[in-house]
């Protein structure tokens, strides 16, 4: 069976966890015997594109992600980009004839690729990894199409916007077990609590809340070290954070690593005692939380959105109210004072994450959705 993965950005060029999730789902399907190809774009400003010949970077974005999302204005240039993308996908559909399509993020691509897939009768599952629908409800296509959601929280949001979703359509973003040790050995706790943040540096992710909490720890004269691993999405926001850290007197306690590749993150998670995920607004899933847990790193999260599904408070992680640095500081203080409990939480987190977010589990669910689509009558409705 031939599977075409189509999305706007594909690793190593990506802006966050969604592109990585598509890559891992594609790899997991390949391990189940599917012949996989990827159709995406080449965005040089996001770094080298890699040399995987199965990844075809022939599409063109209808805009850019440089300095935020910018759309091409209407005109001949935009029309030319759309014609190029239509011709490119048409050639692949005709020459390679995929049996199914795993559709990702169509931002800056438009709905035309989905419309082409439906016109060609290609069973298509779109993995929705954001809390907003990929398109308005009236544009739901007629054809062999359905959505798979990254979490039950995403499914709830889709239902709120009028889309029909089912519990079996949740396909969690999987871990990449190739980067993980089979078993993370127990380590002797360092004198200072090792605190980490991993993700895009942007206000909605809440790194400023973590800095405020670190300031409270400093005033309490508690031992800790704080590491930020991530690049700014909002221009200049990283400079604002560094200036705030300097004002707080946190420079000796804080390190700024910049962007870390996915394969580098497990080493970081194994060095940290806790990962703080202080998002202010609901997240679709929180892949970094699951990844840190798989390395026995205890997540401390605001628990908004899909992250709430990953963490069971007091069992495999800890939850705090969003936007409350004092509450976060209190939880971090408790972690400093009870390292035995912290290690117990870490062991449970590792077991839960590796069981629930194994690639084979997600691939099996995705394959089931494709099989259901393939069994439908060609003229069947798009609702499910």
Image: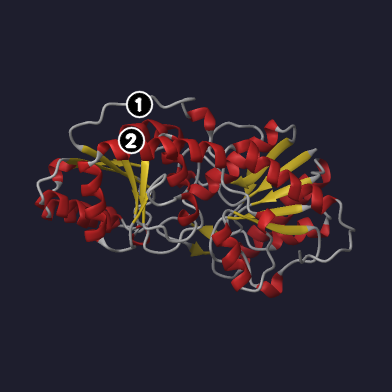
The location of residue 138, given as percent across then percent down, is 70, 75
Q: Nearer the viewer, residue 173 or 9?
A: 173
Quadrant assignment for the N terminus: top right
Q: Is residue 240 left or right of residue 113?
A: left
Rendered image: mark on residue 186: 1
Q: Nearer the viewer, residue 312 or 205?
A: 312
Q: At 48% across and 29% down in the image, what residue appears? A: 179
Whole-percent x, y for residue 168 in the image: 69, 54
One can see residue 102 in this view: yes
- The spot of residue 66 in percent (x, y) is 43, 55
Residue at the spot 48% in from the left edge and 47% down from the top edge: 287
Residue nearest the observer in this picture, 40 or 343: 343
Q: Taking 146 as reference, is 194 above or below it?
A: above
Check the image and tell me how it is coloured: secondary structure
Asked whether disc 1 touches disc 2, contact meaning CB atoms under 8 Å apart, the reply is: yes
User: Does dot 2 land on a helix, a strand or a loop?
Assistant: helix
Residue 42 visible in the snapshot: no
Q: Residue at x 41, y 40 (%)?
A: 292
Residue 384 higher or lower than 192, as above or below: below
Tag 2 residue? 343
Residue 343 position, x and y percent, is 33, 35
Mark earlier in primary sequence (1, 2): 1
């Amino acid at each position: 069976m031939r599977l075409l993965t189509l999305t706007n950005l594909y690793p190593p060029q990506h802006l966050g966890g969604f592109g990585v999730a598509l890559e891992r789902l594609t790899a997991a399907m390949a391990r189940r015997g599917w012949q996989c190809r990827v159709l995406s774009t080449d965005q040089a400003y996001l770094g080298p594109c890699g040399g995987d010949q199965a990844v075809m970077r022939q599409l063109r974005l209808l805009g850019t992600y440089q300095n935020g999302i910018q759309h091409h204005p209407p005109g001949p240039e935009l029309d030319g980009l759309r014609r190029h993308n239509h011709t490119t996908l048409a050639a692949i559909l005709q020459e390679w004839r995929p049996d199914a399509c795993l559709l990702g993020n169509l931002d800056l691509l438009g709905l035309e690729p989905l419309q082409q897939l439906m016109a060609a009768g290609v069973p298509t599952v779109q993995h929705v990894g954001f809390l907003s629908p990929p398109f308005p409800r009236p544009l739901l296509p007629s054809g062999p199409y359905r959505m798979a959601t990254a979490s039950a929280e995403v499914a709830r949001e889709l239902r709120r916007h009028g889309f029909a979703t089912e519990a079996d359509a949740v396909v969690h973003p999987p871990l990449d077990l190739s980067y993980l040790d089979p078993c993370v050995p127990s380590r002797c706790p360092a004198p200072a609590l090792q605190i980490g943040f991993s993700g895009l540096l942007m206000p909605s992710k809440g790194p400023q809340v973590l800095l405020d909490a670190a300031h409270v720890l400093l005033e309490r004269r508690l031992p800790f070290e704080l590491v930020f691993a991530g690049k700014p999405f909002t221009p200049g926001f990283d400079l604002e954070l560094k200036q705030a850290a300097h004002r707080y007197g946190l420079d000796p306690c804080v390190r700024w690593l910049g962007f870390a590749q996915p394969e580098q993150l497990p080493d970081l998670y194994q060095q940290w005692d806790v990962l703080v995920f202080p998002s202010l607004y609901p997240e679709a899933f929180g892949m970094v939380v699951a990844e840190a847990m798989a390395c026995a790193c205890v997540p401390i999260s605001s628990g908004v959105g899909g992250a709430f599904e990953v963490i069971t408070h007091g069992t495999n992680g800890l939850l705090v109210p969003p936007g409350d640095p004092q509450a976060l500081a209190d939880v971090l203080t408790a972690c400093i004072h009870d390292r035995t409990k912290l290690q117990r939480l870490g062991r449970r987190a590792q077991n839960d994450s590796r069981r629930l977010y194994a690639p084979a589990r997600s691939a099996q669910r995705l394959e089931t959705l494709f099989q259901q689509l393939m069994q439908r009558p060609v003229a069947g409705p798009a609702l499910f």
